[in-house]
Image: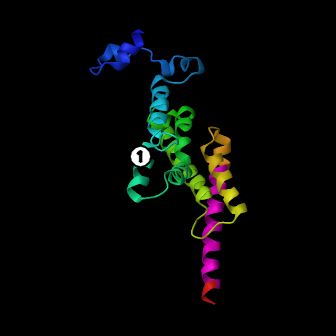
Amino acid sequence: MEWLRGCCQTNANSSQLSRPHPCHVGAAEFGVNDLVANMFVFYFALLSHITPPVCLAVFAGAQIAGANMWETAWVAVKMSSVAYLLPFLIVFMPSLLLLGTPYEIAIDSITALVGLLLIITAIQGWALYLLNWPERLCFFAVGACLVWPDGTIRSVAAVLTLFLGIYTVMRSKRRDNLSVL
């Protein structure tokens, strides 16, 4: 019960901040930094505002807009589905919390950003034009490989990202040229 009293006090001092909290009691056994474990739990607590059945922010927005609350909630989950990956990325890439060398921070941040953008593109189905299912699958696979914590897989995915970008731009221009004719 000592940890509960420390968590509930509003004036936290350094001794309370250094106590083990229940969210990361077992995290040290798996080699997870205390800050990373706390941010994992904190981030998921913030996601409760958009996750059904709680999703207070979505229900409030739907009420203001006069829309169906449950349809709005599921659209919110679809649109923010990549946000559910971010806490896991933080566990496997602590450099996203600026823990590590500047090189690690830069590489992990760039690959995570591009990977998540590719996954979002696959989910939404739009990249300069409407994507078909095989293209969406390619975007998703390359994006997932970019956020994978293995350096070799991320290196191959970085090269595939360049090819995918070139393909997307060339196909978009070809579609534009065909629409003019």
- How far across and down, in percent of the image, does residue 120 sit? 57, 54
Q: Quadrant of the C terminus?
A: bottom right
Left or right: 176, with 20 as reference point: right
At a point 42% along the width and 59% down the height, the residue shown is 66
Query: In x, y percent, where is residue 124?
Result: 58, 59
Q: Is residue 124 above or below residue 93?
A: below
How many labels, in total?
1
Q: Please indicate whether residue 178 sits to the left or right of residue 93 in the image.
A: right
Camera-side residue of 116 and 93: 116
Outermost residue to the bottom: 181
Q: Tell me the magenta residue range.
A: 157-178
Which SS type dominates the magenta stretch?
helix
Measuring 65% from the left and 66% from the top, which residue is drawn there? 131
Relative to residue 141, is residue 2 drawn left or right? left
Image quarter where the N terminus lies is top left
* Image spot of residue 67 (x, y percent): 46, 58
Q: Residue furthest right?
A: 134
**Mark 1 highlights which residue?**
57
Q: Residue at x 59, y 21 (%)?
A: 30
* Residue 136 shown in magenta: no
The quarter of the picture where residue 89 lies is top right
Mark 1 neighbour density, 10 Å: few (under 14) some (14–19) many (20 or more)? some
Residue 33 coordinates in the image, percent (x, y): 50, 24
Q: How is the image coloured?
A: rainbow
Of 116 and 152, nearer the camera is 116
Query: In the orientation shown, which residue stands out farthest toward the left?
Result: 11
Is residue 176 magenta-colored?
yes
Q: Nearer the viewer, residue 3 or 16?
A: 3
Q: Secondary structure at mark 1?
A: helix
Q: Amino acid at mark 1?
A: Ala
